[in-house]
Image (cartoon, rainbow, N blue to C red):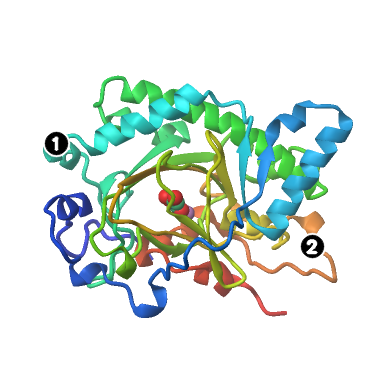
Amino acid sequence: MSTPKDWPEPIIRVQSLSDSGLPEIPDRYVKPPTERPVTIPDSNDVNIPLIDLGGMLGDDNTRAATLDQISDACRNWGFFQVVNHGVSHDLMDNMREKWRQFFHSPMELKQSYANSPKTYEGYGSRLGVEKGAILDWSDYYFLHYLPSKLKDHNKWPVLPDSCREVIEEYADQLVKLSGRLMKILSINLGLGEDHLQNAFGGEDIGACLRVNFYPKCPQPDLTLGLSSHSDPGGMTLLLPDNNVVGLQVRRNDKWITVKPAPHAFIINIGDQIQVLSNAAYKSVEHRVIVNSAKERVSLAFFYNPKSDLLIEPVKELVTPEKPALYPPMTFDEYRLFIRLRGPRGKSQVESLKSPR
Ligand code: OGA
Ligand code: NI
């Protein structure tokens, strides 16, 4: 199985469709009725857990309570948001604005970074290479930060001004925050604090960024900005838009709209941590809805295992009562699935489960 060199059909930028002011979306974006977002008036004020990471720097009790909150969120939600995470708020705002500007730059500039399914790096408008697939209402930009051998500044936008410097600083800070979270997850799983990080490859982890741009949509009830999926990698740190909601998380067959706290990061468990934790922690399905009044920008930072390491349930978490649920697989091999077939709920990690 390998990825083809090019897309199966000409790429259409969703932003161009949106800007053209068409009153109806093309059939390519119309989801089957069961996948369409049903908008229930905002009756529930349920939200994913909000955690003050500053608690990790407090006294022993505060620290223990914070660890417990995160443990509960990882086991029961797969999603939580953190505040007091140590990343500069100005940097977060600046990074989001740079990318908003990028998506509002002339199409010729954006097209010069057009991506291919070979690496997905650059400016893209689809995930998956199946001809005739129903597409999502979004464009994106994908780039590598780690390992260093994959980082190529020429594949990062040169504009707006100082964009590359801001991306560097942002990614550097998010790698550090991810390292702190990995220690917390590791301790909460009853492992040594470096265990999870070492299982990811120690210093040799992967980190990449996907900036999502969801243009205004004339028929938001018929489509999705991003179809239901679980993140294939290790852990995701999402910086959501500051003006408009859109992310929905699946919980007991309901979709919960995430209400982000100011300057929070939304953290979620990816498939690789589900595998390593032998399903103690679950990667949870999520999707993005769009709307007719406002565009939305979000930045997903993916913290991943070294791509050629075999990832399998941690030995300490495998017992006669809880046998290993997943066979060993490298992340390189694993992510081919979403790269070829596009977002498909949790079908991949579920299909791996070895019945015993
Ligand atoms: C993703 C993702 C959510 C969002 O990029 O994997 O789930 O709110 N994004 O854009
Ligand atoms: Ni995701």
The answer to whether residue 227 is above or below residue 97 is below
Q: Where in the figure is residue 180, as x and y percent of width and height?
A: 67, 33
- Give the side of residue 283 with respect to residue 167, left or right: right
* Frontmost residue, 47 versus 224: 47
Q: Quadrant of the C terminus?
A: bottom right
Quarter-of-image position of residue 316: bottom right
273 to 224, vertically: above or below = above
Closer to the observer: label 2 or label 1?
Answer: 1
Q: Residues within 10 Å of mark 1 (few under 14, many from 20)?
A: few
Q: Secondary structure at mark 1?
A: loop
Q: Tell me: 30 left or right of 16.
A: right
Q: Which mark is residue 26?
A: none
Residue 178 at x, y = what percent? 60, 36
| Relative side of 176 to 116, left or right | right
- Amino acid at pointer 1: Pro
Residue 318: image tag:
2
Q: Residue at x 69, y 69 (%)?
A: 325
Question: Would residue 219 be visible to someone looking at this image?
Answer: yes
Q: Residue at 53% across / 35% down in the picture?
A: 262
Of the pair 100 and 232, the residue shown nearer to us: 100
Q: CA distance from mark 2 to mark 1?
A: 53 Å
Quadrant (top left, top right, bottom left, bottom right) of the N terminus: bottom left
Disc 2 residue type (three-letter): Val
Mark 2 touches mark 1? (CB < 8 Å):
no
Q: Position of residue 211 (x, y in %)?
A: 37, 42
Judging by the rendered image, the residue that carries numbered circle 1 is 106
* Helix, strand or loop under label 2: loop
Q: How many marks?
A: 2
The residue furthest right is: 61
Pointer 2 local density, CA inside 10 Å: few below 14, some 14–19, many at least 20: some
